[in-house]
């Protein structure tokens, strides 16, 4: 028997929680938001909150352990994305960019290079671009498409 389809969300600083809830309610897919501190979620039978310890990577570990081929994982964390892909999950960034087995190696390498550059140059390198309305729209489309594909 196949595991049930569900959305697992790396809840710390996720800018698209409301969009996740809307798609989940429309398609009737359960959502689990995971973080290491208490946070508000809508009172709804499809929405679950998991608060893990504040240990290093506790939320990531929980999500990676729960991931499987029936999971859509939403995270901006490249190393967590890599672990979830290896578990068979579909992984999306909050901007709607899919992490895939073909793209994750380059993303991990780029992350390591940027960390090295930031360590040497301080904060003058900068970080990711600010979250935009187009990112939100792209995420909604990508989440919908990923779930529809799994529901078939």
Image (cartoon, rainbow, N blue to C red):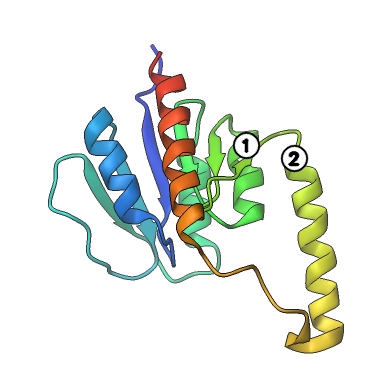
Q: Nearer the viewer, mark 1 or mark 2?
A: 2
Q: Is residue 71 left or right of residue 42?
A: right
- Above or below residue 41? Residue 47 is above
Quarter holding the N terminus?
A: top left
Numbered label tally: 2
Q: Is residue 116 left or right of residue 101?
A: right
Towards the viewer: 146 or 75: 146
- Report the Cα–Cα distance between label 1 and label 2: 11 Å
Q: Secondary structure at mark 1?
A: helix
Q: Secondary structure at mark 2?
A: loop
Q: Which residue is mark 1?
A: 85
Crowdedness of circle 1 by 10 Å Cα count: few (<14), some, many (20+)? Answer: many
Which x, y percent locates residue 55?
49, 69
Badge 1 or badge 2: first in the primary sequence: 1
Crowdedness of circle 2 by 10 Å Cα count: few (<14), some, many (20+)? Answer: few
Q: Residue at x 34, y 55 (%)?
A: 17
- Above or below residue 86? Residue 150 is above
Q: Quadrant of residue 41?
A: bottom left
In the rendering, which numbered label is found on residue 103? 2
Q: Residue at x 23, y 46 (%)?
A: 47
Which x, y percent locates residue 97?
59, 45
Which x, y percent locates residue 64?
53, 45
Towards the viewer: 95 or 120: 95
Quarter holding the C terminus?
A: top left
Which x, y percent locates residue 82?
66, 45
Residue 15 in view in this figure: yes
Which residue occupies the extreme front position in the image?
134
Residue 32 in view in this figure: no
- Above or below residue 57? Residue 22 is above
Q: Residue at x 58, y 29 (%)?
A: 88
Towards the viewer: 27 or 80: 27
């Amino acid at each position: 028997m196949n595991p049930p389809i569900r959305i697992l969300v790396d809840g710390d600083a996720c800018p698209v929680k409301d969009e996740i809830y809307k798609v989940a309610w429309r398609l009737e897919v359960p959502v689990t938001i995971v973080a290491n501190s208490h946070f508000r979620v809508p009172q709804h039978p499809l929405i679950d909150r998991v608060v893990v310890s504040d240990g290093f990577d506790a939320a990531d570990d929980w999500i990676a352990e729960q991931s499987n081929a029936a999971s859509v994982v939403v995270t901006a964390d490249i190393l967590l994305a890599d672990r979830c892909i290896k578990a068979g999950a579909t992984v999306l960034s909050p901007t709607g960019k899919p992490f895939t087995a073909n793209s994750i190696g380059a993303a991990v390498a780029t992350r390591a290079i940027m960390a090295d550059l930031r360590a040497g140059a301080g904060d003058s390198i900068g970080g990711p671009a600010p979250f935009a309305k187009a990112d939100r729209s792209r995420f909604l489309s990508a989440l919908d498409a990923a779930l529809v594909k799994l529901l078939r």
